Every structure is written in C-alpha cells, then in structure tokens.
Amino acid sequence: MSDIICPQDHPDIDVYAVVGHPIAHSRSPMIHEYFAKETGQAMFYGRIDTPPETFKKVVSDFFAAGGKGLNVTVPHKLLAYEMAEVHSVAAQEAQAVNTLWMQDGRLHADNTDGLGLKNDLERILGSLLQQKKILIIGAGGAAQGVIQPLQAAGAQLSLVNRTLQKALDLKRIFPSLQVHAIDDLAKSESYDLIVNATAAGLQNNSPLQKKTLEKITHPQTLIYDMVYGKDTQFMQDGQELGLKVADGLGMLVEQAAAAFAIWRGIHLTSHQKQGAIQLVRQALLQS
Ligand code: ATR
C-alpha cells in the first residue's frame, strides 16, 4: 500500500481517501467501499499516511490532481480547519474538520462527527434527541466536535471534564452548555444518555467512578463510548449496572454516511448503514 494516493493513477474513477497519521488501522475505506457498492457508485477510496508537517501540501496536491474528497482524522482535524476556505456551521463551531471537498474552485469543509453521533444515538434510542438530557464527559477535540449538532437537535447538554478549566473554556464557546465539576456530579440530576468523549478507555480507565455513574443514571439511560472495537471500563461499568451500552462504531459509520451524502448526493438507508456496521464489527472480531 502506498502512503500517498495519486488520483492520476485512477483516471476513470472518482478518487477519495482518508488522511491521518497513523492510518493503517482506519476502517473508513471498508465502509466507503461498501457504501459505493451498495449504491452503484464508481469510486476508489484509499488511505493517506502523512505527518502534520506535510499535511497541507498533501491535501493541496490531492485536489490539484483531481481528487474528489478527503476524510480527515487524528491528528489533522485542526489543520484541515485552518486550510479550508468555506466552513459548514458544524465545522465552524467545532474548529475542526473531518470532511473536505472542492467546490467552485474553493476548498469546502464540514465536520460530520457530531451529526454521526446524533444519528447513531437516535438510531439506538429509536427516538429523537429533543429534550433528552445528555452528559458529555471530556473537553478535548472529540467533545467539542459534537456539541453543536447535539444542541441543534434539541438535547439538553451538560459536560464534565477531569480538568474543569477546559470544560469552562468550552462553555465560553457554547454558552447554553451546563458545566459541572466531576466532584459535584453525583449531586446532579440523572441523564438519559451519558457519552464518553475522553481518551480514558484507550488507557483502560474510566473517566467516572462506577458509584458516580450509578447515581446519575436511571434504568433507561444509554451509556455510550465514542471508542469502538473495545469494551472499555466505562462500558463494562454500565453493563454491570444493568444499563443499555453502546460503543462508537455506529457513530463511525454515520459520520461516513454523512460525508458520502455530501460528496455523492446520496443518502444511505438505515439498512445499508446497518450492513456497514455489521461488516466492520465482523472485521474487528477477526483482527
Ligand atoms: P480528543 O481530540 O480525542 O478529544 P484531546 O483533545 O487530547 O483528545 O482530549 C482528551 C480528553 O480526554 C480530555 O477531555 C482529557 O481530559 P483532560 O482535559 O483533563 O486532560 C480526557 N482524558 C484523557 N485521559 C483521561 C483519563 N484517564 N480520565 C479522564 N479523562 C481523560
């Protein structure tokens, strides 16, 4: 596999890629190839591994050579935001970008992570997020990327973070966000959904103590971890408390479907998105 995709190498087909560093683990090519097959779209979707120093040149070269669209992942979402000329509202509020495309000679950018999370939560709940009480844990890029779309869906958002100041910084950007100190959380109300947007699961930690989780949940609360392909401590605690639990694989597929809709003008059906979730779940089990 080449580290750089050259659209000239695929002259008869529209070329897309996901760009990150590292990128070998990315499941985006598998998801987009599946979407393309399902909808009869002739497209090639590859991976580009490039460090931050060369990111902007690689993106410019890709589009100059006729590339149609890029997904952007860690650690480049902020660089992609800086580079883009036209931003969606979601990209503007997140100050981070995961989808790029060229339109009328200008580099356009969106952030479909938040819409992906919103769609996945609604799929799991079987209802809209309007009036739902959601607690986001974390105040990094992953959290910032999902606040605007969840608020736009009518959810009541609260947020906690290990470092309170970072949560308060986000409140300056999103004034209607309710920010709590982690120590005060147990005194707060219960939530319909609790979303882990921290990196704690990757370090085999949970960002909340199980006894705190117990105090702020009710029997219908959904425990959601944005990490996928791993039963995190946070998810295990949720399971032990008898709660409904989900990982972030559905969000991954939904953010990809939203990018696919931007690029190809085609909206995947629930059935097709479910098919992609199953495909990736299978691949994760075998890896
Ligand atoms: P990302 O872009 O993935 O959100 P980030 O910007 O580095 O990454 O943010 C990581 C988030 O995970 C932060 O909210 C961080 O908390 P701090 O702001 O206190 O650093 C949170 N985090 C990471 N490890 C954690 C842990 N072990 N427990 C709780 N929170 C953790």
Image (cartoon, helix red, strand yellow):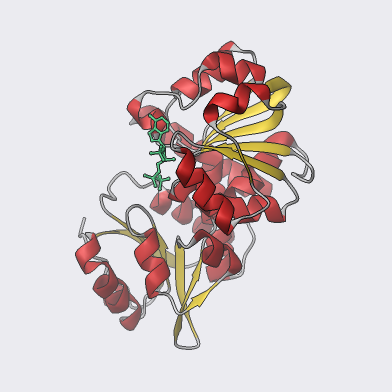
In the rendered image, the vertical position of residue 8 relative to residue 80, given as above or below: below
In the rendered image, the vertical position of residue 48 relative to residue 195, given as above or below: below
In the rendered image, the vertical position of residue 189 relative to residue 11, given as above or below: above
Tell whether 120 sits left or right of 102: right
Query: Is 157 in front, or is 225?
Result: 157
Q: Is residue 260 visible?
A: no
Give the residue displayed 67% in from the left and 38% down from the top. Answer: 134
Residue 231, percent from left and from top: 45, 24
Query: Is 170 in front, or is 53?
Result: 170
Give the residue displayed 50% in from the left and 78% down from the top. Answer: 86
Q: Residue furthest bottom?
A: 104
Looking at the figure, which quarter contains the C terminus? top left
Tell whether 266 sits left or right of 165: right
Ligand 1 is located in which of the four quadrants? top left
Give the residue displayed 78% in from the left and 40% down from the top. Answer: 127
The picture quadrant where one finds residue 222 is top right
In the rendered image, the vertical position of residue 158 relative to residue 259, given as above or below: above
Residue 171, percent from left and from top: 58, 51
The picture quadrant where one finds residue 198 is top left
Query: Is 169 in front, or is 198?
Result: 169
Residue 82, percent from left and from top: 39, 71
Residue 180, percent from left and from top: 59, 35
Give the residue displayed 51% in from the left and 44% down from the top. Answer: 167
Query: Is 259 in front, or is 148?
Result: 148
